[in-house]
Amino acid sequence: MADEEKSTLPGSARRIFVVDAFTDKPFGGNPAAVCLVGSKELSDDILQKIAKEMNLSETAFITEKNSQDTYNKGSCFGLRWFTPKCEVPLCGHATLASAAVLFNSLGNPNKEVTFETLSGNLMARRQGSSICLDLPLNSSEPLSEEDQTITKLIKTVVGELAVKEVEYSKTTKKLLLCLEPTLTRSG
């Protein structure tokens, strides 16, 4: 499930795991790197360099919050995610990978762990042999198609496909499009 690699970074040695999320097969699913930072946070510049070096869609960085919450027995950790280019506010598969490292690779006995993140507290809990995540619900609001900028943007993205609804999430700053169902039949 996880390939471990040791690397030396400022401060002390760090452990980095590469985990294939959403699969039980090696080299399947969605890979994420998980870096155990320890209790001393690294600079954003160092985190970004590690993520760039890992060159996966996301690298998760788990921080121990206090002396009682060590990786192998704690229940609350800091968690951040970086792509090779920037920090992101949320990443589901790298959160799942982080929980898998704590529970399966490091033997953390807790039934549930909490990750403190830019998106709020996220819970990961054991559910049989699986891991269940509680991720935030990001609400959205309907937008009218009267805004010419939005109309042009939508047209650029979907072309001639019919748009059923347009909503915007202030939390994620993302435009959500619901397209009319279409069916094409080939000869």
Image: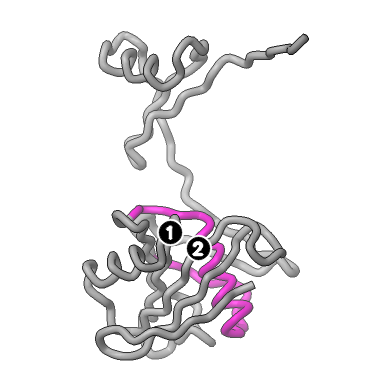
Q: Amino acid at mark 1?
A: Glu
Residue 159, percent from left and from top: 45, 14
**14 versus 47 height, above or below:** below
Report how far apart the C-alphas of labels 1 and 2 lie in the structure: 6 Å
Tell me if label 1 and label 2 are in contact, CB under 8 Å: yes
Crowding near pointer 2: few (<14 within 10 Å), some, many (20+)?
A: many
Residue 183, percent from left and from top: 68, 14
Crowding near pointer 1: few (<14 within 10 Å), some, many (20+)?
A: many
**68 versus 50 height, above or below:** below
Residue 3, percent from left and from top: 57, 77
Q: Amino acid at mark 2?
A: Ala
- Identify the element where label 1 is drawn: loop
Please tell me in which quadrant of the rendered image residue 120 appears.
Answer: bottom left
Q: Which disc number belongs to residue 58?
A: 1
* Residue linked to disc 2: 32
Please tell me in which quadrant of the rendered image residue 47 appears.
Answer: bottom left
Give whichever of 8, 39 is nearer the camera. 8
**179 versus 115 height, above or below:** above
Task: Determine the residue positioned at 53% across, 57% down.
Answer: 93
Give whichever of 26, 105 is nearer the camera. 26
- If you read the primary sequence from the N terminus, does the residue marked by circle 1 or circle 2 appear first? 2
Q: Start and end of the magenta stretch?
A: 88-116
In the rendered image, residue 106 lying in the magenta stretch gets the answer yes
Task: Determine the residue positioned at 48% across, 10% down.
Answer: 160
Left or right: where 58 falls relative to 125: left
Task: Determine the residue positioned at 57% across, 14% down.
Answer: 180
- Identify the element where label 2 is drawn: strand
